[in-house]
Image (cartoon, helix red, strand yellow):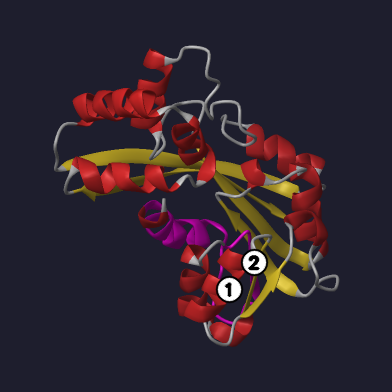
């Protein structure tokens, strides 16, 4: 997912209206795809980032010296009220235990008039980097829910969540992301690491079913090169 996150980050930061002179927070930073873009725009000392995973937070800190990186969940941000001009959550809302509370916390730490923004892949529309994987899963296992019901994954979901969190003047849009993969193996290998819902699903299968799923994905995509076209729903609101 990292390659897609890196491609998405500049467009997302543009949509969130992150400008020089701002202080920004990256919520659910992971290893730091969006953090890197914020540092490029604002400088390391103007950026803070949090992730509930100690491993991800450590990776983000290692890659971004000078950034204030902390281990924390979106629902309990370790910052004072109004510290930031913008708080962003890239591909994170659907992993929050309580998305409305998480977005409300982002609003709390953002100054009056500042921006809170979030984005989630179009899971319901099947336009995600993982769509070929889940298409193959549903052919082989029609009862598997997949990711289509994740929070924020339908058009209008983020607007509803942001509004419930108390944000004003909420606007929603869609951002396209396209990534070329040189080979099928390059695309497949990250699933085998067991990370995220797709990886967890794959590694939970018996070896024979894993092989069947891999083969079906290979039939869908071919040997490569091929391009995966995705889009993310994005929403921003004012505090």
Q: Is residue 137 left or right of residue 67?
A: left
Are the two marked residues, 1 and 2, in contact with CB atoms closer than 8 angstroms?
yes
Query: Is residue 239 visible in this depiction of the protein?
Result: no
Q: Is residue 21 magenta?
A: yes
Q: What label sits on residue 54 in the rendered view?
A: 2
Q: Is residue 44 magenta?
A: no
Q: What label sits on residue 219 in the rendered view?
A: none
Q: Residue at x 31, y 46 (%)?
A: 189
**Magenta span:** 4-29
Query: Is residue 186 visible in this depiction of the protein?
Result: yes
In x, y percent, where is residue 206?
A: 43, 27
**Label 1 Cα neighbours within 10 Å, binned few <14 / some 14-19 / many ≥20:** some
Q: Tell which of 148 and 82 is nearer to you.
A: 148
Q: Residue at x 80, y 70 (%)?
A: 78
Residue under circle 1? Answer: 58
In x, y percent, where is residue 88?
A: 62, 60
Q: Residue at x 49, y 56 (%)?
A: 12
User: Residue furthest toward the front?
Assistant: 207
**Numbered circles on residues, count:** 2
Q: Quadrant of the C terminus?
A: bottom right
Vertical order, 72 against 184 (above or below): below
Q: Element type at marker 2?
A: helix
Q: Tell which of 194 and 124 is nearer to you.
A: 194
User: Residue furthest toward the right?
Assistant: 81
In x, y percent, where is residue 204?
A: 50, 32
């Amino acid at each position: 997912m990292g390659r897609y996150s890196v491609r998405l980050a500049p467009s997302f930061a543009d949509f969130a209206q992150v400008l020089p002179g701002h202080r920004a927070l990256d919520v659910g930073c992971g290893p730091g795809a969006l953090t890197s873009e914020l540092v490029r725009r604002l400088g390391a000392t103007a950026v803070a980032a949090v992730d509930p995973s100690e491993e991800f937070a450590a990776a983000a800190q290692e890659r971004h010296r000078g950034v204030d990186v902390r281990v924390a969940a979106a629902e309990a941000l370790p910052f004072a009220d109004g510290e930031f001009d913008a708080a962003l959550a890239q591909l994170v809302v659907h992993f929050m235990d309580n998305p409305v509370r998480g977005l409300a916390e982002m609003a709390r730490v953002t100054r009056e008039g500042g921006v809170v923004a979030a984005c989630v892949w179009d899971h319901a529309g099947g336009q995600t980097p993982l769509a070929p994987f889940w298409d193959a899963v549903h052919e082989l296992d029609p009862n598997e829910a997949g990711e289509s019901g994740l929070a924020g994954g339908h058009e209008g979901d983020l607007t509803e969540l942001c509004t419930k969190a108390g944000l004003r003047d909420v606007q929603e849009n869609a951002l396209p992301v396209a990534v070329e993969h040189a080979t099928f193996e390059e695309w497949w290998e990250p699933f085998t690491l067991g990370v995220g819902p797709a990886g967890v699903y794959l590694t939970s299968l018996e070896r024979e079913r894993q092989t069947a799923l891999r083969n079906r994905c290979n039939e869908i995509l071919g040997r490569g090169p091929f391009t995966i076209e995705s889009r993310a729903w994005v929403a921003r609101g004012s505090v």
